[in-house]
């Protein structure tokens, strides 16, 4: 997330930490660089100016400048202020016994996909969501919502063919919920435009007055830049939005919009889209994102993702295999699928503290897919007993996986090294236990 901004800030603070003593001029110089980094990341000028002023006021306190680790203290202050800039404490949805959520935004921001992602998240939390197609301008949007609903097994209400009145479509959905759909959270996917206009706002205002929704969520593309702030302000003025969903935070977007919208609109960012897949969607927690931007990692989110993706029984079985050095390529595939369910590997490793500081830190997804293809090209017997893989078998696996014999040999060599390491680790643990028994 925010790779350009993150790299710049980490470089600035790395230099600041290197000073044993810090003067006011050191702090001024560092914060000038920080302000430039924020502006280059598309943070609103006024937002950046006020933010730097708050950090400077706290950073120049006597207790900070004269502390044993002043550089670390200033980073701590910056982290706390960045979390406040992003919204402070996370603000959850206001969910009632029967909740109505209006999803709004411009065309191309990701409204329809975000509606489906939110429905899937609520479904995992035990709610019974339904989706309602209220974008009568684009028939493709209605079909897209219906397709996404089938993928996540969530009911979708589509308007009658030829329906042109949005309120009639919404009323029909409410009636369907009362009679046929057992849903307690209804999400209404609305029409958008290339830019804000009176016709769009009149339509959305009338729909809001009719539905009286508990939440009005604005979907904004992180790649929009500073325009996202004016978009958010425009929608908030017309509709009094209750929260924001920021999409495409996993891309190369400079991300300043997310840092500015909360300060300008005073509306919380409630969710973030972190990938194209429907399960790559998470509650926006400012403190955790601030940690990721500053290279401090986000272990809490990592653990939560692992808990969702990994079955306890599978984890126990895998741990036993590793401990007894009986790990084979079948187990390798199981582990590989576990990791895949948690999201892109580079994003996962980026949540570990310090990993984003590693020079040349990147994951070759194509290489990972080739590795998986090699293992899938093995027979079940070959995965269980890699020692039977002679030259002829290796040639067949290379052809089947679209790789070379050299790549197959490299994978087998690394796998053999890993198994030997696990075996030696097991021996060492047994030796230590024996020593503890003899010398309690």
Image: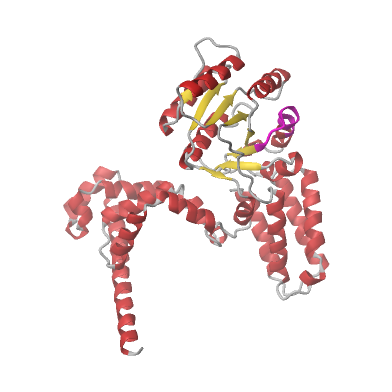
Residue 53 in sight in this render: yes
Q: Residue furthest bottom?
A: 439
Residue 153 image offset from top left, x and y in percent: 41, 31
Return the residue nearer the eye: 205 or 144: 205
Give the quadrant of the C terminus. bottom left
Q: Residue furthest top?
A: 162
Q: How is the image coloured?
A: secondary structure
As drawn, is 96 to the left or to the right of 367?
right
Is residue 237 in the magenta section?
A: yes
As drawn, is 45 to the left or to the right of 107?
right
Compared with 354, 18 (above or below) is below
Tell me the chief SS of the magenta region: helix
Compared with 23, 356 (above or below) is above
Residue 276 in sight in this render: no
Compared with 425, 385 (above or below) is above
As drawn, is 291 to the left or to the right of 371?
right
Residue 416 image offset from top left, x and y in percent: 28, 63
Return the residue nearer the eye: 250 or 311: 311
- At a point 58% along the width and 38% down the height, the residue shown is 95
Badge count:
0
- At a point 66% along the width and 64% down the height, the residue shown is 14
Residue 206 image offset from top left, x and y in percent: 68, 19
As drawn, is 362 to the left or to the right of 227?
left
- At a point 71% along the width and 19% down the height, the residue shown is 202
Return the residue nearer the eye: 422 or 15: 422
Q: Which residues are magenta?
A: 233-243
Is residue 257 in the magenta section?
A: no
Return the residue nearer the eye: 350 or 82: 82
Q: Which quadrant would residue 262 be assigned to in this image?
A: top right
Residue 253 image offset from top left, x and y in percent: 61, 42
């Amino acid at each position: 997330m925010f790779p350009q901004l993150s790299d710049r800030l980490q470089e600035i603070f790395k230099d600041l930490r290197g000073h044993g003593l810090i003067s006011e001029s050191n702090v001024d110089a560092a914060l000038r660089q920080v302000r430039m980094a924020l502006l280059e990341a598309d943070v609103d000028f006024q937002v950046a100016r006020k933010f730097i002023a708050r950090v400077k006021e706290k950073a120049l306190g006597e207790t900070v400048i004269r502390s044993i680790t002043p550089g670390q203290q200033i980073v701590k202050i910056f982290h706390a202020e960045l979390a406040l800039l992003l919204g402070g404490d996370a603000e959850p949805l206001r969910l009632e016994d029967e909740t109505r959520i209006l999803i709004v935004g411009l065309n191309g921001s990701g409204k329809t996909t975000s509606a489906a992602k939110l429905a899937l998240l609520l479904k995992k939390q035990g709610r019974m969501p339904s989706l309602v197609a209220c974008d009568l301008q684009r028939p493709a949007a209605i079909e897209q919502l219906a397709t996404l609903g089938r993928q996540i097994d969530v009911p979708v209400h589509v308007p009658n063919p030829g329906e042109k009145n949005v309120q009639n479509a919404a009323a029909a959905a409410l009636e369907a919920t009362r009679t046929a759909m057992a849903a307690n959270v209804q999400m209404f996917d609305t029409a958008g435009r290339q830019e804000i206009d009176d016709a769009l706002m009149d339509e959305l205002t009338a729909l809001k007055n009719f539905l009286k929704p508990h939440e009005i969520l604005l979907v904004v593309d992180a790649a929009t830049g500073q325009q996202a702030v004016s978009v958010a302000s425009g929608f908030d003025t017309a509709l009094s939005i209750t929260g924001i969903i920021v999409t495409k935070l996993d891309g190369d977007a400079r991300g300043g919009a997310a840092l500015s919208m909360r300060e300008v609109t005073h509306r919380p960012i409630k969710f973030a889209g972190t990938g194209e897949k429907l399960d790559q969607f998470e509650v926006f927690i400012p403190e955790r994102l601030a940690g990721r931007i500053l290279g401090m990692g986000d272990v809490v989110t990592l653990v939560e993702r692992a808990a969702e993706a990994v079955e306890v029984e599978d984890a126990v079985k895998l741990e036993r295999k590793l401990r007894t050095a009986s790990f084979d390529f079948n187990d390798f595939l199981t582990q590989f699928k576990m990791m895949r369910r948690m999201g892109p590997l580079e994003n996962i490793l980026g949540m570990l503290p310090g990993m984003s500081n590693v020079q040349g830190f990147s994951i070759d997804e194509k290489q990972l897919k080739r590795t998986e293809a090699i293992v899938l090209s093995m027979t079940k017997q070959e995965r269980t007993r890699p020692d039977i893989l002679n030259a002829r078998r290796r040639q067949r696996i290379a052809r089947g996986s679209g790789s070379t014999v050299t790549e197959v040999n490299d994978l087998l060599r690394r796998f053999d090294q890993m198994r030997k390491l696990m075996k030696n680790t097991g021996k060492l643990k047994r030796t230590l236990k024996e020593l503890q028994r003899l010398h309690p």
